[in-house]
Amino acid sequence: MIYTLQQALNALQLGSLYALIALGYTMVYGVLTMINFAHGDVFMVGAFVACLTARHLGLPFVPVLLIAMAATALLGASLERVAYRPLRNAPKMSSVITALGCGLVLENVTLWKYPYPQTFPPLLANRGFHFAGLFVSSVQILIVGIAAALMVGLDLLVRRSKWGLAMRAVSWDRAIVPLMGVPVDRVISVTFAIGAALGGAAGVLYGVAYPVIDPSMGVLVGWKAFISAVVGGIGNLRGAMLGGFILGGLEVMVAAFLPSTYRDFVAFTLLLVLLVVRPHGLLGRPIPQKV
Amino acid sequence: MNRRHLTLALTLSLTTLLGTAACGKKQAVPDIKIGLIAELSGDIPAVGASCKNAAEMAVAEINLEGGVTVAGQKHGLRLVVDDSAAKADQAASAAQKLITQDEVLAVVGPNASLGAIPAAQIAEQASVLLITPWSTNPKTTLDATTNQPKKWVFRACFNDLFQGTVLAKFAVDYMHKHKAAVLYDVSSEAPKGQAELFKKDFEANGGTVVAFETYTTGDRDFTAQLTKIKAAGPELVFLPAYYTDVPLQMQQAHRLGLDVPFLGSDTWSSPELIKLAGADAEGAFFSNHYSASAKNEITGTFVVSYKKRYGQEPDDVAALTYDAFRLLQKALNNATALDRAAVRNAFAKISDYTGVTGKMTFKPGSGDPVKSAVMMKISGGKFTWVTNVDPD
């Protein structure tokens, strides 16, 4: 029982990171029905920005997190402005391939400056607590806490604020909304910025959790977060969060109770079965094709 | 008129220049091209950098000493470097390119077994001598279908059949541990082979492996496996993994309250490991190919000149690459003709050689040298020598 709870804690940490990154994919898909494959690399840039500001400016955790989020927000919005906006009316495939290309550019620029894996500075003192037989570390609590706070914040923003209303409107019908006076371009930019900032925050938390970072760190994690978003129902925010926790939970629990060699095989087979049963993801709704 | 004269004069002088240049080239003996496949980009760039550094140093030294004498004719050596990105497919295409396009006489590298195995297969099929400095997986020098030694593939290091016994004996006899856990990358050849061979030898020495866990390349979260390992109650954790994974594994183990000694293999040997792992690596043991502090003339000279050239201590990849080039030099000097077969035959005839990494003996018909291993300990932020383990 203790063992299961201990593994559940591990799953919670991994799942909250996947969930945070998955939000970036799902938000962009929500407003543009486009998959931003550069998002995994935006996440990597977030980790590197945090690593460098902490190392060279010696800042503590909170300013580092805010700077990394601001930097990735700017990066996300600029990617949209420079690379995706000119292609908004082009076939979907063009922007998806452009996104893959943008990701490669980010990866290789970082690789060129930092060819070696870097140590992420210890921003937080790590202390372990024994709690009812469980071993909990302060880093674990903090990662789960910050990720949860960011997710709740986003949920409130989208459901309660005027900008959130505008985002939902754009995602509802991008052709009609400008007629109501909604500045579509600005809403899309803001969506990209928020999604990227969450990815950047995930990068910082990831660096704290797994303090060896390298330019290709975003590839595998990015794919897994994308899968989380699809499983939860791409375009749906709560779905992305749910999907992240499901994938994290599956990965940890399969490794915990079956031989760990089966981890990816079992985890992804289960996800495939889920998609066969619910092709639009857990919380996704089928979108009727307009003719 | 004036202009035409000028053009004529220019053309004439250019032709003369070109002519002399061409003549100059014709008279000099062409350099011998040696291919080098290194992990310059990808997951383990420090391995590729060490390999390339040592190769460049070895070639510069050999050329300074007057090059090699093949069948009475003196030649310089020239390196053609290609990147394997520490990936199997890129290592194979690098080998293909060096052999067919660059037409190198012999190939040195790749180092990581996952790239060395396919590259060795290509060299074997193309009948080109390939020497891998660092690939320890038995499959590198063995033919996949017949399980017989490959004809064209050699290595400068011991293989994992030996390394497995060294580590198992060390764990039982020196560390006095009888319950071990293993965590390894199931998608990488060297770590996978080492994990399996260690398990076999450790159990043969009277130990039990209480947990045998895996992950795949690129994973950064090992908490599920480590929690499982902790629950199994080992006295020792064996982590055969490259320097990018090991620091995270050590740190996560400590965060989960798993405080038992770590044991590693030669995959640890890059100084980057200490830089990335910091205090978490203190007190861990691993097997290695040589110790930079060994007190003998060949090693000493190599370490001093490498440090002078690159400002850092050479790791085992550097030392083995250097030995591979010195072995190749010996083969070239003994070759009866300047072709791939003659060089391979001369290499196969080398039986004893003492290099930076110690004494090696090649048995006839085998590409694997018999040589000693070194056990190292990480203490005070440094690799320190513990003991030498000789083959039986």
Image: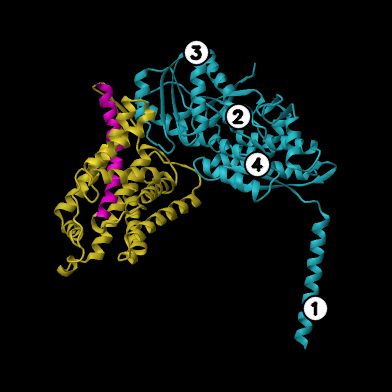
Majority SS type along the magenta span = helix
Badge 1 element: helix
Answer with mark 1 or mark 4, whichever residue precedes in sequence.
1
Q: Which residue, given by chain and number where applicable, does mark 4 sit on?
A: B126
Answer with mark 2 or mark 3, whichever residue precedes in sequence.
2
- Gap in angstroms between the C-alphas marked 1 and 4: 50 Å
The nearer-to-camera label among 1 and 4 is 4
Furthest-right residue in this view: B72
Looking at the rendering, the stretch of residues picked out in magenta corresponds to: A1-29
Residue beneath the point at 26% across and 25% down: A4
Is residue A213 visible to the viewer in this orientation of the structure? Answer: yes
Answer with mark 4 or mark 2, whichever residue precedes in sequence.
4
- Gap in angstroms between the C-alphas marked 2 and 3: 34 Å
Report whether mark 4 lies on the same chain as mark 2.
yes
Q: Residue B374 carries which label?
A: none
Subunit that carries the residue with mark 2: B
- The chain coloured cyan is B
Report whether mark 2 lies on the same chain as mark 1.
yes
| In the image: residue A258, left or right of residue B86 | left
